[in-house]
Image (cartoon, coloured by chain):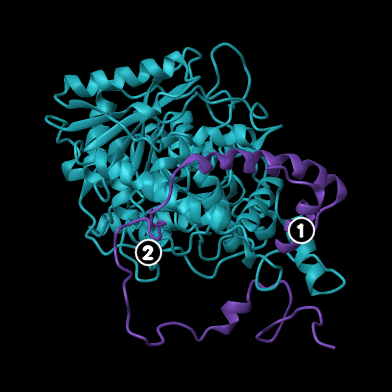
Chain colours: A cyan, B purple
Amino acid sequence: MSELTDLTIAKARKGLAKGDFSAVELCEAHIKAVDAANEALNTFIVTTPALALERAAQSDKKITSGDAGALEGIPLGIKDLFCTKGVQTTAGSHILDQFTPVYDSTITQNLFDDGAVMIGKLNLDEFAMGSSNETSYFGKCLSPWKRKTDDANLVPGGSSGGSASSVSARLVMGATATDTGGSIRQPAAFTGTVGIKPTYGRCSRWGVVAFASSLDQAGPITRTVEDAAIMLKSMASYDPKDTTSVDLPVPDYEKTLRGGVKGLKVGIPKEYRVDGMSDEIEQLWQQGIDWLKSEGAQIIDVSLPHTKYALPAYYIVAPAEASSNLARYDGVRYGLRVPGDDILSMYENTRAQGFGDEVKRRIMIGTYVLSAGYYDAYYLKAQKVRTLIKQDFDKAYQKVDVLLTPTTPSPAFAPGEKGGDDPVEMYLNDIFTVTANMAGLPGISVPAGLSSQGTPLGLQLIGKPFDEAGLLCAAQTLEEAAGLLPAPDKWWL
Amino acid sequence: MKVDDKLVRRIARLARIKVSDSDVQHLEGELSSILGFVDLLSEVDTDNVEPMTSAVDRDMYERADVVTDGGYPDDIVKNAPERDDHYFMVPKVVE
């Protein structure tokens, strides 16, 4: 039998049901894998092995008694942005490193209700702000992948770097993640995993540490499209505790997964062919077009003229909302407190020591664009541009069902390679993913091949609002055509 | 858009973040770069365009105006860095 950690969620579920192995055995295998890898990869901020084994034992009882949930006994990692009852939730920040929630986020509660077993909390860019997982207070986390030409470490992408890296390295079977500008899809592309950002409103944001509330949306990172369908079904729900959660039934994504793409109209947006895009990304994109075409999809050229304004508009909207959301970290109700001479200096000292450089930069940009006299010129202007971006998509979706693009303009890079002198260089990573956040649309990244350096590359599909089922179905076709990527070498053993 | 040291200090004060002299120096360049990047939007014609106020095309749900939560002050103050009984403690603000 192959190693338990190599199984997909779908296969593990079958194995558990048949009694080939127990949930405790499955859990132990993953705890062992994490223990062997975490020093090198730093994907977990905290592990919870005792709690995991206790839950796994409960799962075994449920499986025996025939009460198994959809994710019964499946070992998962939880991005440390999701509040977990009794387990520290840091958002990757010093300001929250002593915070232990007294409640679970709706999403983790949904997963636990379905029997999922949490192995620990996963590393991320501080407050989910970053594209390389280098801004975490708990140290950078690494990708399990390396280039075949050298031994340099690579970033797993971000902000859900710990999620993507752990899933890729076979430390967990799936992980929760969040995506404000690309933070599920970009790390998925960098690590050869599947990452879906659902439509805004599909998954509850309640209990997820807020970054930019009109853009934040949670989703899963897994090793196959089928596993993404299984996990998303459990994570998604209508939640009255989140006023932007949408009251629509959650379809059974597994049922429609293998419907194929015959007759599907796939749009190719010409504006995503950007200057300086590498030949291999260009070729990958063409390969994706050919795969879908040969399965019976109809390829249609479309135009999304405001694409190039999405990223600059994002860097007004997201920091503005972040500056407002992060105002709560003042050293009074929870988190770090650094004393000062009076209350104002207590606030200023707390926030100066508690936040890292990237978070401070974004809070300050947000503060500036919302300050008296500048609101109209920046924030209001960006929200108007957002309307134009959404209208571009609305027009395209009159002609097509789904859009196909590359997920990232380049493969994974090494720590320290980008953004050192100019933060904007790092921001450009999200150029293809940020549009879906600005328009609230669902997007998925599927591993589509390896670069000339032997590192993963992803293709992105962007769907119509609440058509995650259609998106997963097209993604399944891509995955079958591309074939599953091999597991990365376990160089840390 | 050029951000000078005076503006960096003003923004930092508004954001309630203490900055050192060396912070101010590198923040000038970084904030200038970001604001320069977003200035690209000035070329977009947004006359007669409504600002987006909701990412999905749906009306806000309403619920009955009743108390549905509360009654656990122990939990509320549990993570406070300084507390006394069910109160958050802060430095003296009124003489």
Using residue B19 as the reference point, say whether residue A8 is left or right of it: left
Between the residue at mark 2 and the residue at mark 1, the CA separation in whole angstroms equals: 34 Å
Percent x, y of residue A8: 33, 36
Q: Residue at x 61, y 55 (%)?
A: A369
Using residue B8 as the reference point, say whether residue A384 is left or right of it: left
Of B5 and A94, the residue lying toward us: B5
Q: Residue at x 39, y 71 (%)?
A: A241
Q: Label 1: which residue?
A: B10
Percent x, y of residue A261: 16, 31
Q: Residue at x 30, y 67 (%)?
A: B59
Q: Which image quarter holds the N terminus of chain B?
A: top right
Amino acid at circle 1: Arg
Of A303 and A119, the residue lying toward us: A303
Q: Classify A361 as above or below A298.
A: below
Secondary structure state at the residue bearing disc 1: helix
Q: Label 2: which residue?
A: A244
Amino acid at circle 2: Thr
